[in-house]
């Protein structure tokens, strides 16, 4: 289905969420000289790839996948299927260092996307990672009761 057909179908069915998403993707691609897209082989990146393939009429997006050496054979096969289905090439990139070496040098990565999101929320409020008592941090970062509640919820989620 062509881009214009997708927009028309969305509009005819009052599905403006998808319509808006496709328009946003098109605007981003139009402003990009050499866009790249990371593919993980998971369902989220499959959806992004599908949207981009329907939006990138010039075929200027380059795709890549980071081969950490821990992936299942099924993931690698899935990447080949994506290449065939969409007529693209997904460049395989090996990292400079294996994961165990990185863990030794830099520590364990975040346990989940949820923790990462909560940390992003704190940083959006200019939170500095300080070793201060909770009351001091609340006075510094929470201006109202709702801010205080959100701050405590977010802080609790990060420190679990």
Image: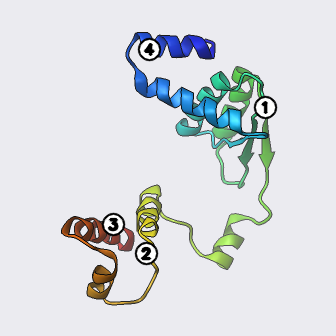
Measured in 3D between alpha carbons, the distance from the residue under mark 2 to the one under mark 1, in whole angstroms, is 39 Å
Neighbours of disc 1 within 10 Å: few (<14), some (14-19), many (20+): few
Disc marking residue 154: 3
Q: Which residue is mark 2?
A: 127
- Is 62 placed left or right of 108 in the picture? right
Instruction: Indicate the secondary structure of the residue bearing disc 4.
Output: helix
Q: Earlier in the sequence, mark 4 or mark 2?
A: 4
Q: Which residue is mark 1?
A: 60
Question: Which of 106 and 145 lies nearest the eye of the viewer?
Answer: 145
Neighbours of disc 3 within 10 Å: few (<14), some (14-19), many (20+): some
Locate residue 159, reporting x and y percent. 37, 74
Neighbours of disc 2 within 10 Å: few (<14), some (14-19), many (20+): some
> Which numbered disc, 3 or 1, marks the residue closer to the eye?
1
Q: Residue at x 61, y 12 (%)?
A: 1
Question: Which of 151 and 47 lies nearest the eye of the viewer?
Answer: 151
Q: Report the quarter where the C terminus lies.
A: bottom left
Q: Earlier in the sequence, mark 1 or mark 4?
A: 4
Q: Quadrant of residue 156?
A: bottom left
Measured in 3D between alpha carbons, the distance from the residue under mark 3 to the one under mark 1, in whole angstroms, is 40 Å
Q: Which residue is mark 4?
A: 11
Q: Residue at x 69, y 21 (%)?
A: 85
Locate residue 24, reporting x and y percent. 55, 33
Q: Earlier in the sequence, mark 2 or mark 1?
A: 1
Instruction: Indicate the secondary structure of the residue bearing disc 2.
Output: loop
């Amino acid at each position: 289905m062509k881009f214009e057909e997708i927009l028309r179908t969305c509009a005819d069915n009052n599905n403006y969420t998808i319509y808006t998403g496709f328009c946003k993707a098109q605007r981003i691609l139009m402003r990009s000289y050499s866009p790249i897209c990371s593919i993980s082989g998971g369902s989220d990146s499959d959806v992004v790839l599908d949207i981009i393939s329907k939006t990138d009429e010039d075929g200027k997006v380059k795709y890549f996948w980071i081969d950490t050496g821990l992936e299942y054979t099924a993931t690698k096969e899935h990447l080949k299927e994506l290449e065939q289905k969409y007529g693209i090439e997904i460049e395989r990139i090996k990292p400079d260092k294996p994961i165990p070496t990185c863990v030794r040098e830099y520590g364990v990565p975040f346990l989940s996307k949820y923790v990462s999101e909560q940390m992003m929320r704190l940083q959006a409020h200019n939170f500095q990672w300080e070793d201060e008592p909770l009351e001091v941090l609340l006075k510094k970062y929470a201006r109202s009761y709702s801010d205080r509640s959100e701050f405590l919820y977010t802080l609790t989620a990060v420190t679990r």
